Image (cartoon, grey):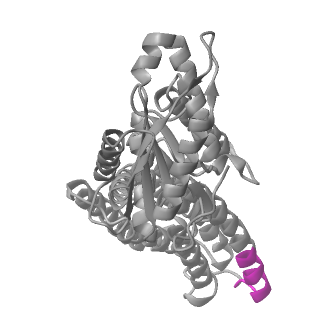
Amino acid sequence: MSRPPEPDTPRAPAAVQRGGYTLEYPAATSEIVEALHVDRQALVRDAILWQRWIRYVGFVALVALALTFGRERESMLLPMTSVALVYVLCVSITATMVRRAATVHEHRIPALLVTADILTLTAIVWLSGSPADAPRILIAGLLVVQLAVFYFGRWHGAYSAVLCAAGFVLAARILPQQVAGVPTSTSQLLATLGLFALVSGVLVTAYGSFRARMNQLRLFCKLVEQGDLAPTLLLGVEKRPDDLTLLARSFEAMRTRLAEQIGTDPLTGCLNRRALETRLRAEWRQAKRRGSTVAVLAIDLDHFKSINDTRGHPFGDMVLQEIVGIMKATARDTDAVARVGGDEFVVVLPDTGWQGALTFAERMRRKVDDFSFASPAGALGVTISVGVALARGTDPMSPEALLQDADRSLYKAKTAGRNRIFA
């Protein structure tokens, strides 16, 4: 049986949107976000350092091609040397600064390097060829666009594409000709720019989408790394699946299997203590974010030791399984039922006020009281005692303190005569 949420605490959506993709989990804590940011800065630093070798090799190849196939070799030798000196100094000095720096800004230095790449490319093509050779800027620039968007993000990919287009226009129509040739017509210019915009747009969109989904997978892995097996990743149901979709499915299957192995009580199938603590922290973060409430019920079977002693442990195990079945049938899908000891249970009720928590506790107590447990020695009735505690996410307390409040209420319910509820 289910119960409606409290009118003063509307239920929030079970899933949140991040970057266009869904992660069924409360908003990440500031500590996790900061950890991901630090990891991101380290990745940018490493990418800048190893990409300098690609820049050196690419630059040498570009200069060699220009000197081999370019016209007016003697006149372009001095300016080409100046361009080479400035570019190599820019890349090497930047790499030295990055290597020595404690942190690396993930936008500024990549943008500087992308700018240097495109300006150098434009200068070499302009010095070695005629306006008809300007499309070479766009062809080589696609490599810059691809590396920029994949390692540094959509913004850098779009920025490099715009710079490439600007360099092409400069070399084809605006800058004075270094090598005699027929100027590019307006129709040719627009057709070439349109084709480049199409190809670069696909690159930025595809790689940008891949990177955004990869960030979701990183967040998911960070949560699991911290022992939180509650989040569910929905990247495995993409409309346009790719290898990352397969990887996400594998991670989700691994998380599910791991959660079953370390987060489930083997006898009753409900959460164990470790999983309960993780779930309660997650619900507490949700309550803090929304200003809603979390109710906790501590439950203990009355005189359970005597049941084991007189009827045997197999019968006691059957009683525990039946009790858990009653709890789960009473709870909502969003509630959590956990076994924290031999005959001790905890139920977490998110978005539930005092009236809802007490109503749930009484309904569950009455169902257990009315249930008859069959055994060879005859039917047996079992009762439970329930302690109820509740807090808002804005209250200055911790999930652990909330559990302790429920335990104290349970103790009072048992000392007052058992088979009752105390809040």
Residue at 29% of width from left, 57% of height from top? 95
Q: Nearer the viewer, residue 36 or 177?
A: 36
- Residue 206, image x, y percentages: 66, 59
Evaluate whether residue 250 shows in this view. no
- Residue 374, image x, y percentages: 64, 19
Q: Nearer the viewer, residue 75 or 167?
A: 167
Image-based side of 41 in relation to 63, left or right: left
Say which quadrant the C terminus sits in: bottom left
Q: Nearer the viewer, residue 167 or 330?
A: 330
Evaluate whether residue 273 shows in this view. yes
Image-based side of 244 in relation to 394, left or right: right
Per the rendered image, the range of residues in magenta is: 183-194
Residue at 53% of width from left, 48% of height from top? 231
- Residue 246, image x, y percentages: 66, 40
Residue at 58% of width from left, 69% of height from top? 71
Identify whether 176 is placed above or below 370.
below
Identify whether 327 is placed above or below 309.
below
Which quadrant of the figure has residue 103?
bottom left
Whether residue 391 appears in magenta in the rendering, the answer is no
Residue at 64% of width from left, 42% of height from top? 329
- Residue 137, image x, y percentages: 59, 70
**Magenta segment, principal secondary structure?**
helix
Identify whether 3 is placed above or below 245.
below
Q: How many marks?
A: 0
